[in-house]
Amino acid sequence: MKLDRRGFFKIVGIGASAAVAGAPKTSHAWQSKAPPDPYGCLVDLTRCVGCRKCELACNEVNHLPEPAVRFDDLRVFDKARRPDEKAYTIVNRYHTGKRDDIDRMTPTFVKVQCMHCQDPACVSACIVGALTKKENGAVHYDVNKCIGCRYCMVACPFEIPAYEYLDPWTPKVQKCTFCYERISKAGGKPGCAATCPTEAITFGKRSTLLKMAHRRISENPAKYIDHVYGETEVGGTSWMYVSDVAFETVGFPAVPDKPMPKLSETVQHTFYTYLWSPAVLYAVLAGIMWRQSKKEKEA
C-alpha cells in the first residue's frame, strides 16, 4: 500500500469528521430493551408425539407453499431438518436411548422455530430497523425497510432467519412471525399453539409460563430435568422448553446466558465514546507511512 502525506491527512480528516459526527458524547452502560412481560410459548417435549399438526397450522396461517414431504408422511423424520424460507417451523425426531415402561425405545420430538429472544441479536444487527422486538414478544420483520444485507442471519445464535435466494426480484428474510397479527388481538394464539392436540405447546404470558414450567419440574422431578431452556439463554427467549432428556442431546445449542447484543453494543459504544477507533486508524496509517519512508531512505 502506497500512501503519500496528502493522502494521509485526507484520511485523517475523514476519520475525524466521522468520529465527531457519529460518536456519542458520553459513555453508556448497556441496557436491556426487553419488554417487561411479553407473551411466550412453553413447549413440553414429554408431550410432543411428532404429529406435525403445528407444521400444518403454520403453513396454512402464513400461506406457505406445499411442503416437499406431506404432513402425514412420517418418513420426513429420517433426516434432521431446519426451518427455511418455505417452512417457518419444523419438528425433528431424536433417539437418545430413552425407553418406555415395556422397554421399547421411545423418541423425543423437538419443534424448532424462531425463539423470539428478549434482546434479539438480529434486531441489534439490523442497520435499517427492519427487525424490531414488540411489546407482545414477537420479533417483527418489516419487509419495506429491509435492504437484504442479511446481517440478521449472521447474528442469530440459533441460525433461524432464512433468505429467498431463488427470488431474483423481491427476496425477503423469512422466519417464524410468532403469528404477530393473531396474538395482537384479544384471545389470539399462534397457529401452532392453537392446534396442538396434546397441549405440548402452551401460549401465555412469559412470567406465567415460567411458573408453570418450574411447577411441572418440582412436582415431578423424576420425569423432568431441572432446566427450563430459554429462561436465561441469551438473556431469555419467548419460546421455552421443558424436557425429560438433556437439551444438548436433542439439538439445542449451548449459548451464553448474556444477551448477545450486550457485548457488541458495549464494544461499539466504548470505541466511539473514547475515540479509540479513529486512534487505531491513525496509528495504522502512521505505521504505514513510517515503513514507506524507511524503505525510500534505504533504497
Image (cartoon, rainbow, N blue to C red):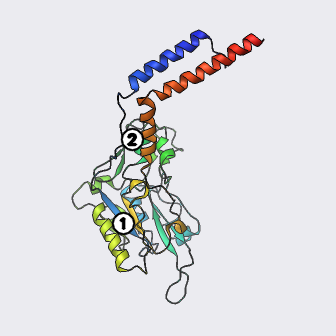
Q: Residue 25 carries which label?
A: none
The x and y percentages for residue 78 are: 58, 69
Residue type, mark 1 in image? Leu
Which residue sits at x=77%, y=13%?
Answer: 298
Residues packed near mark 2 inside 10 Å, few (<14), some (14 to 19) or many (20 plus):
some
Could you tell me how far apart the alpha carbons at marks 1 and 2 are, in whole angstroms? 28 Å
- Which is in the foreground here, disc 1 or disc 2? 1
The x and y percentages for residue 139 are: 36, 49
> Which residue is tagged 1?
42
Q: For mark 1, give the secondary structure.
A: strand
The x and y percentages for residue 3 are: 63, 15
Q: How many labels does the image show?
A: 2
Q: Can residue 220 be seen in this view?
A: yes
Depth check, front residue: 93 or 195: 93
> Which residue is tagged 2?
143
Discs 1, 2 touching: Cβ within 8 Å: no
Residue type, mark 2 in image? Val
